[in-house]
Amino acid sequence: MTELEHYISSYFGVAQPEDLNAISQFFRQETLKKGDFFLETGKGCNKLSFIQSGMLRIYLQTEDKEVTQWISTKGYFVTDLAGFVFEAPARWTIQALSDVELFTINRSDYVKIGQLIPKWNELEKLFIARCFVILEDRIFTHLSMTAEERYNFFFENNKELFNQVPLQYIASMLGMTPETFSRIRKKQLNG
Amino acid sequence: MTELEHYISSYFGVAQPEDLNAISQFFRQETLKKGDFFLETGKGCNKLSFIQSGMLRIYLQTEDKEVTQWISTKGYFVTDLAGFVFEAPARWTIQALSDVELFTINRSDYVKIGQLIPKWNELEKLFIARCFVILEDRIFTHLSMTAEERYNFFFENNKELFNQVPLQYIASMLGMTPETFSRIRKKQLNG
DNA sequence: AATGGCTCTTGACAAATGTCAAGAAATAAA
DNA sequence: TTTATTTCTTGACATTTGTCAAGAGCCATT
């Protein structure tokens, strides 16, 4: 099984080798240089990618600040769901934090998967439902935890990220300023 | 078109009257008294309902506090997605804030819709994707707004809720204490 | 090694939000 | 209506988090 097939299998639960192979044929390899944009707010997003290596930051520039929504790393998929599924203008700007290797599929090929694999729509549904549940959890952390608790919770589950990306982005994605993040960090390292 | 058919049509985009009718046949009417539990954390959730009248609160009791995740009102659907789709133990407790009338479908009947309507899985996918996008927005409010801004944003879009449910629940669902909520409220009414 | 540009840390202070306790107001129960 | 219960508001104060400004550390380029 190729790495791509492994991702598809684990995210969508596709089991048949021939199906996996057929699906993976639709993807093409693509690379981004550090700083390149995968997507910009307001533009069309007609692709979905799996990250083979590197990291991407999903964010939005508002009037007064830049809000990082998520950082996607190896093994994750990346797209603007509203853009990809509903052909709406992209909500997020997505930029490479490092050189990035991707497996990318475009919308028209993606649609073909549904025609090829009868169960695809259901697998996709289950996939998006899992994503929904993850967001539910994330909202819950904001309703129930302090900045420090969110820091610890995220750190426990994403230790490796802390020495790979600028910390200010992690701070933003946890809903706090870089200064607060830095102080909590100091406290956790010393205490 | 019945009220139920209207909901199904607007949420799932089912267009054919005969399909709508077939789907709506699977639903049964159900009522809850104020205070009754639609679902309790940890139990199985094998039903999904549309709210014909009344309000339900979706929340979770933690060690030290009760966190309201959402309040569902007329026209909305209600379920524990992880429980309903993945047959996982329910994450949320769902309780009637008032007497409630529901249209309810159970999981086994729900599955039958998929067999009846070829496009169902796709419509469902789109439906859940829309829910996902709504949660993305909600997370964004927590990353980018103060308590006061979240209050105003929510108030503008849900004025009617403010004189229908205990405000402490709205406070919790916006991620602030009842006291903070009350002070912001005063400020907005006076200023 | 020196330069420049980011990024992170720190301090001092300000603002926002939480906590606790009391009482007022609203709602439900009798 | 009266009483009881819950919910909301308010004040005083504590804590958390944000803001601003300066400087330290780090990294890449020269």
Image: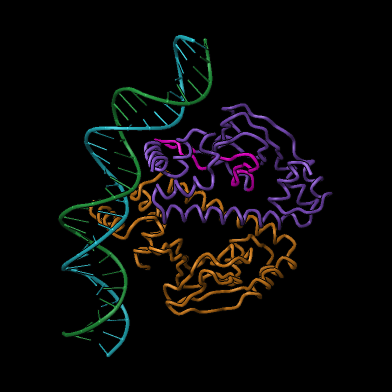
Chain colours: A orange, B purple, C green, D cyan
Q: How many marks?
A: 0
Residue at 71% x, 58% y: name it: B122
Residue D9, position as x, y percentages in the image: 38, 32
**Nearer to me, B116 or B13:** B13
* Residue A95 on the magenta segment: no
Q: Which residues are magenta?
A: B60-85
Task: Name the residue at the front extreme.
Answer: B191
- Rendered view: B105 above or below D7: below
- Rendered view: B94 above or below A126: above
Q: Is residue B35 left or right of residue A97?
A: right
Quarter of the image with the C terminus of chain B in it:
top left
Residue B99, position as x, y percentages in the image: 62, 28
**Nearer to me, D20 or A128:** D20
Q: Is residue B105 left or right of residue A148?
A: right
Q: Is residue A84 left or right of residue A53?
A: right
**Nearer to me, A152 or B53:** B53
Residue A7 appears in view: yes
Residue D2, position as x, y percentages in the image: 45, 9
Residue A150, position as x, y percentages in the image: 38, 51
Residue A161 appears in view: no
Residue at 75% x, 45% y: name it: B5
- Rendered view: B149 above or below D2: below
Residue at 55% x, 50% y: name it: A133
* Residue B79 on the magenta segment: yes
Quarter of the image with the N terminus of chain B in it:
top right
